[in-house]
Amino acid sequence: MLLTACMQSTSVMSTADAPQWLKGEPELYPNFKYLTATGSASKSEQAKARALSNLAKIFEVQIREVSTTLRDTQTSQREGVETVQKNQRIASSVNLKTDKMVQGARIAEQWQSSADLTYHTLAVLDRSQAGNNIRGEMNRLDNETQFSLQQHDSRNDPLLKISDLHTANTLQQDRAALQQTLKIIDVRGKGDPARWSLAELDERLQRELRALPVQAVIKSDDIGGLKNILEGAAAEAGLNVAAVGSGAYTLAASLDSQAPMLVDDWHWLRATLKVELVAQDGITVIGYKSWPLKVSAGSASQLEARIMKAADKKLKAELLKSVLEFAS
C-alpha cells in the first residue's frame, strides 16, 4: 500500500523556503476536507513512507482501544435459590488493522531542505474517501454479524448458539471502534450508528451462558482444591455449574504436578493444568487445552499454594475463551 501511494504521488521537489505545511495546516489541503500527516528522512522514499505511516497512526490512535462495559456474571445456588451477581468491568477491544482505512492516501508534496538535505513529505487523504473506507469495513462487520445471528436462530445445539452470539458480539465491538473513528473523520460528527446494541448482545450472551447445562468434574488433582478453582472460574465466565445429571455438558479439569526441585537454594514446582469439554452424551470430547505452570519460592512449603494460585489465574483468564473455541 505504501509503495503504491508513493508511486501515484504528485510530489514537488524544491530547495527554496520551507513550505507552509511544515508549520501548520496546508493551504491546499484544509483540515475540514483532508487528513494530513508529514514525514522526514534523509532519503526521499523513506520520508514518503514515514508520512504515510504517520497518516495511518491517526486511525490507530482512535481505534487502538475502545472500552466496552461488559458484565462479569457470577451465579450460585443455595437452598434451591439461584443468586446472580453482576460486577461491572472495563474490557478493551482488539487492535484493528488500518490498511483498509488509508486506501486512497497519496503523497501530495515533498520538499528538501538545502541546509541539511533532509526530505520533508506531506501525505493527504480526502476525508470523504476515508469515511467511505471505514463504512465499507463497517458494512462487512454488519453482514458477518447478521449471518452469525441468523445461524444462531437456526441452531439447536446450545453451545453452538453461544459461539454464534459471541462472534456477533466481537464483530460489533470491532465496529464500535470504527464508529468512534468515523465520528471524528466525518465532518458531521455523527458517523453511522449501529443496528445492534452491544449491551443487548452481551446480555443475550450472558443469559445463554447461564442457561447452558454444565457440570464440573475433576479427573486428577495432585495438590487439592482444584474443584473450587474450576467452579470459581466457570462462574466468572458466566457459566452456571449447578446443573448436573444427564443432558449436561461436562467441564473436566486436571492438575498433574512434578516432584519439587531445589536449584541454587531456590525451590521450583512444575505442573500441567488441563481442561476439556465433554458433550452431552458424556463420551465425546468436544475440545481440550493444557497449560504448563511453573512457580518458585524460597521455601518448599510455599510451592503448593503458589501453583494453585497460578492455576486459578490461568483458568479465570482462559476458560471462557477455551469453551468458545471448542464450540467453533
Image (tube, rainbow, N blue to C red):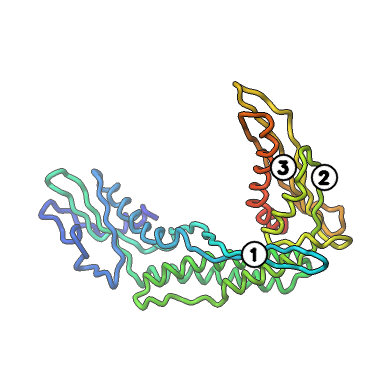
Q: Residue at x 89, y 61 (%)?
A: 246
Give yes or no for contact between labels 1 and 3 (Cβ–Cβ under 8 Å).
no
Q: Residue at x 20, y 46 (%)?
A: 118
Disc 3 residue type?
Leu
Q: Residue at x 67, y 67 (%)?
A: 206
Q: x and y percent of residue 239 in the render?
A: 72, 61
Quadrant of residue 256 within the rendered picture: top right
Disc 2 residue type?
Lys
Q: Is residue 95 left or right of residue 39?
A: right
Q: Is residue 187 left or right of residue 114?
A: right
Q: Tell me the tag on residue 233.
A: none
Quadrant of residue 261 within the rendered picture: top right
Q: Is residue 19 left or right of residue 227?
A: left
Q: Label 1 vs label 3: CA separation?
A: 25 Å
- Residue closest to the far right: 246
SS type, badge 2: strand
| Mark found first going from the N terminus, 1 or 3 | 1
Q: x and y percent of residue 123 in the render?
A: 29, 59
Q: Which residue is mark 1?
A: 166
Q: Tell me the tag on residue 273.
A: 3
**Numbered disc in front, either 1 or 3:** 3
Position of the N terminus by quadrant: bottom left
Q: Which residue is mark 2?
A: 219
